[in-house]
Image (tube, rainbow, N blue to C red):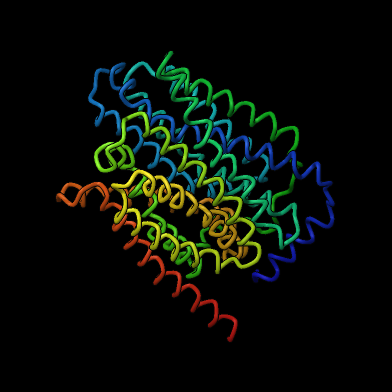
Amino acid sequence: MSQVAVNDSIETMAAEEAPSPAAIALVQLALACGGFGIGTGEFAIMGLLPNVADTFSVTTPQAGYVISAYALGVVIGAPIIAVLAAKMARRLLLLLVMGIFAVGNLLSAMAPTFESFTLMRFITGLPHGAYFGVAAIVAASMVPMHKRARAVGRVMLGLTVATLLGTPLATVFGQSLNWRLAFTIVGIIGLLTVALIWYYVPCDRVAEGASFKRELGAFKRPQVLLTLATASVGFGGMFAMFSYIAPTTTEVAMLPESMVAVMLIIFGIGMNVGNVVGSWFADKSLMGTIGGCLVFNIVVLTLFSLTAANPFMLALCVFCIGCGFAAGPAVQTRLMDVAADAQTLAAASHHSAFNIANALGAWLGGLVIARGYGFAATGYVGAILSFIGIFVFVASRSLDRRDRSA
C-alpha cells in the first residue's frame, strides 16, 4: 500500500465515522490519561531510588538497575507486541497493554524482594511503546490529515504533563509516606485508563490483510529505519543533559539542592511547550520540524555547556532543551507516513528509539564526566549526537526526493 493510499484510508475513516469534536476530545483524553500514568511510573522511580534501596538493603546504584530493566522492557516489548498483535483490533490491544501496565505497577508495589521488583519493572515496561504507538494511530485516524500531528501531540501531552505534575507528586508521596504508594497510584491510573478506553474509544475492525509478516515489513523500509535512527541518535542529547542535571545544578551552578526540583519543573514546562508548539509546526511542515529541532538542539546544548555555571543561563538552557521534545509528535507522525501498511510496528518502535536515545545519551555523558571533563560537558555530547542525527536526517530526505522522482 502506498503512502497516498494510507493517507486516503485515514481520511475515509474519519469521514465515514464523522465523530463529533466532543467525542474526539474524550478519546484523546482517555489516551492521554494512559500517557500520564506511563510517564509518572517511568520517571517517579528516579526520585525514589534511595527509598527503594533502603527497603531492599541494596546500594542506590544497584537500585538503579530497575530503571534499566524498565527501559529494556520498552525496547524489547514495543516491536514484539506490535508483531504478535498484528491481527488484533486496536481498541482491544490498547485495553490489553494498559491492563498489563496497571497490573505490573500494582505488583511492583507489592514486590517482596529486589529481584521480584526488578522483574516487575521489566514486565511493566513491555507495553509502553505499543501503547503510545497504537494510541497515536487511533488519535490520528479520527482527524483530518492536516491535524494529525496535533492529535498525536495531545496524546503525548499526558507524558509531558507527567514530568511536570505526576512525577513530582508521586515522588513527594513516595518519599514522605512509602515508595510503594507511588506505584499503587500509578496502577490505579492505569485501571482508570482501561475504563476510559473501554467507554470512549470506539470499536474497530482488524485491518484487511493484517499479519505478522506485513508488520515486520516495516523494518524493510529504509525511511522507517532512518527515522528511527534519527530519533535514537539525534535526540540522545536531551538525555545526556537530563541524566546529570542534579549534580550540574549543585556542583557547577553552585545552587542549593532544593533547586534541583525547580530545574526539573523548568524542564517539564519546556517539554509541554515543545509538545504543543512542535505539534502545530509538524502539521505545517513535518520534516522541517524534525530538522529544525536537530539544529535547535545543537545550539542550546552547546550554550548549556558554555554557560552552565550561571544559574539564570542554566535555567534558560534547561527550559530550551526541554522544548526539544517538539520533535516527538513529528517523528511519530513521520513513522506513520513512511510505514505504509505496517504502521503499528513502526509507530510502537518510536518509543524504543527514544529509550535507546535515553540509554545512549546517559552512557556517553557518563563517559565524558568520568574522563574529567565535568558535568557541563554533557551538553557538548548532546550537540555532537544531534549533529550526527542531522546526517541521518539528510539521508532520509534524500530517499524521499528519490522516491518522488522515480
Q: Residue at x 45, y 22 (%)?
A: 172
Residue 321 to residue 251: above or below: below
Q: Position of residue 374 (x, y in %)?
A: 21, 48
Could you tell whether 1 is left or right of 379 in the image?
right
The outermost residue toward the left is 371
Q: Is residue 364 visible?
A: no
Residue 258 to residue 358: above or below: above
Q: Nearer the viewer, residue 6 or 258?
A: 258
Residue 404 to residue 95: above or below: below
Q: Position of residue 155 (x, y in %)?
A: 62, 45
Residue 196 to residue 215: above or below: above
Q: Position of residue 143 (x, y in %)?
A: 75, 54
Which image quarter is the C terminus in? Answer: bottom right
Could you tell whether 149 is left or right of 186 in the image?
right
Q: Nearer the viewer, residue 172 or 71?
A: 172
Q: Nearer the viewer, residue 101 or 327?
A: 327
Q: Residue at x 48, y 25 (%)?
A: 170
Q: Residue at x 61, y 56 (%)?
A: 279
Q: How many marks?
A: 0
Q: Is residue 265 visible?
A: yes
Q: Position of residue 195 (x, y in %)?
A: 68, 28
The outermost residue toward the top is 177
Among the 4 quarters of the image, the one containing residue 280 = bottom right
The outermost residue toward the bottom is 405
Q: Residue at x 40, y 37 (%)?
A: 70
